[in-house]
Structures are given as C-alpha cells and as structure tokens.
Image: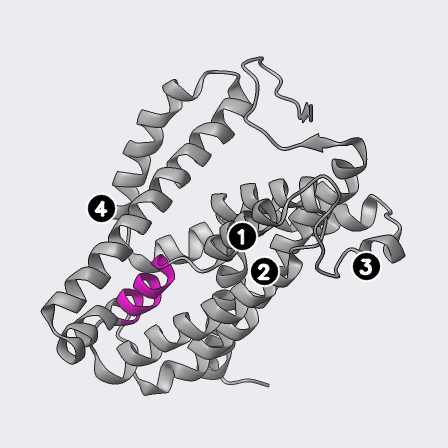
Amino acid sequence: MATKSGATKIFAVALGILTAIGGFVDIGDLVTNAVVGSRFGLGLVWVVIVGVVGICVYAQMAGRVAAVSGRATFEIVRERLGPRAALANLTGSFLINLLTVTAEIGGIALTLQLASSLPPAVWIPLAMFGVWIAVWRAKFSFLENTTGLLGLTLVVFLVAVFLLGPDWGDLGGQLVPHVPQGETIATYAFYAIALFGAAMTPYEVFFFSSGAIEDGWTAKDLAQSKANVFVGFPLGGLLSIAIAACATIVLLPRDIEVTSPPRSSCPSPTPAA
C-alpha cells in the first residue's frame, strides 16, 4: 500500500496528466480541427502529431529550465542572447498570446450564445471581465487544474467517434497525407500551418515556466513534469484528432463546411456552395 507521501505524488501526477489532456485543446484546436475535418478529412492528422511532439519538447524544456535554474525561460533568453533578442522574442510571444486570449474570449462568447441565443456582443464584455478576474485573483494551481479538468468534457468527441459507427477502413485510409479533389496545395498548406500553430502555442512556455516558478519546482519535480507533458499532451492531441474525425464522419460526406454560425437562435452547419 502506498504511503501518504507516495499517494500524494501519484495523485499529483494523475491530476497533472488530466489537466494537460484537458488544457491541450483550446478554441484554436477546436475550431481548426473541425474545419480541417470537414474539408480535408483526416489527411492533416500528421500535422497534429508533429505539433504534439513540438509542444512536448518546448513545454518540457521550459519547465526544466525553470525548475533547475529557478528563473523564468525568458529571463534566461535575455541573459544568453542579450536584451534586444529577448525583447523581440518576448514581444512576438506576447502578441501571439494576445491573439490567443482574444480567440478564447470569443470562444466563451460563442459558447454562451449557443446556450442562450443572445448575441455575442452581450457576452464578450462579460467574458473579458471573467477572464480578467480569474487571471488577477485566482492562484496558478486553481487556473491550471480547474480549466484543465473542465476541458476533459471534450472527451465526448472521442466517445462520439465510436458511437457514430464509421467505416474504420475508410477512416484509416484518410490518414495518408493527400490533397482532396477540389482543394489546392496552397489551401492544404494554409490549413496545415494553422493546425500546427494551434498546437504550438507560446503560452505553453509561459505556462510551464512561470508555473514552475510560482509552484516552487525543483529538480525533484522534473519526473512529474515529464509525465504531465509526455502523457497528457499526446492524449490531448488524441482529442484533437477525435474532433477532426467527428467532422470527417458527419460533415465531410454531406459536403458541409464549418463556418460562422448564422444569426438564428439555433445555429446549424452551412452547406458548402
């Protein structure tokens, strides 16, 4: 039987993995995978896999640097590369994170619109206020665990793939990278880059770096960090693929593309022209 400290460590690792799974899929992954699945099937799954590998490497690197040195990643960048390179790096990351937060707020507003039939303009200010309160007042551990665990509700997409009863042979055949008929290589490349960008978001570096500092990580915590990243993120990537698979099974055969929701109170997919 595990000791109390051992049980605590096991719980911490399990919680970290679950949080990483739920936290991997944000509004960018949700929308991009749905769009890609409705247009390209599973022909861009390879991009998700590459993105998962990349974010695992970068997130683990950020956590390792912070745990061993006791300083945030960007502080080390400034020390090694100089203030100009560090400022350019930090500015670029900040702008991308700003776009990400904007998309997240839009996602909250869209979700509340679908639940209430009220226009997004009503919900956007409330979503902004809620995000501001959460960031300003909530502790890192609360943000990490609560948002990540809530994200586990996306497991419904994985369950839906099996309940939809697809032709597994046909679905597996789509995993081979290809440009579907009616699409161009340029469009294929555009969505490949968008999908890769949805997985490789800079806020993960901030998250693991600043989170490690706030939680007081040391070299002893690296094993837990590694488990969170190398188990949680790939499983989160599996949820991303499940979203694309659902769109492939339901929308692609009917030639329906994921577009902006109509103004009606009950939004529905819009058939492609």
Q: Specify few, some or many for label 3: CA neighbours under 10 Å numbering under 14, 14-19, or 20 or more.
A: few
Q: Specify few, some or many for label 2: CA neighbours under 10 Å numbering under 14, 14-19, or 20 or more.
A: many
Quadrant containing the N terminus in the rendered view: bottom right
Residue carrying label 1: 195
Residue carrying label 3: 172
**Label whose residue precedes the other's in the sequence (3 or 4):** 4
Secondary structure state at the residue bearing disc 3: helix
Separation of residues labelled 3 and 1 (CA atoms): 20 Å
Q: Is residue 51 above or below residue 66?
A: above
Secondary structure state at the residue bearing disc 2: helix
Q: What residue type is labelled 1?
A: Leu
Residue carrying label 2: 48
Q: Determine if residue 23 is in view.
A: no
**Label whose residue precedes the other's in the sequence (3 or 2):** 2
Q: Is residue 69 magenta?
A: no
Q: What residue type is labelled 4?
A: Trp
> Which is the main secondary structure of the residues drawn in magenta?
helix
Closer-to-camera residue (264/160): 264
**Label whose residue precedes the other's in the sequence (1 or 2):** 2
Secondary structure state at the residue bearing disc 1: helix
Q: Which amino acid does label 2 sit on?
A: Val
Residue carrying label 4: 136
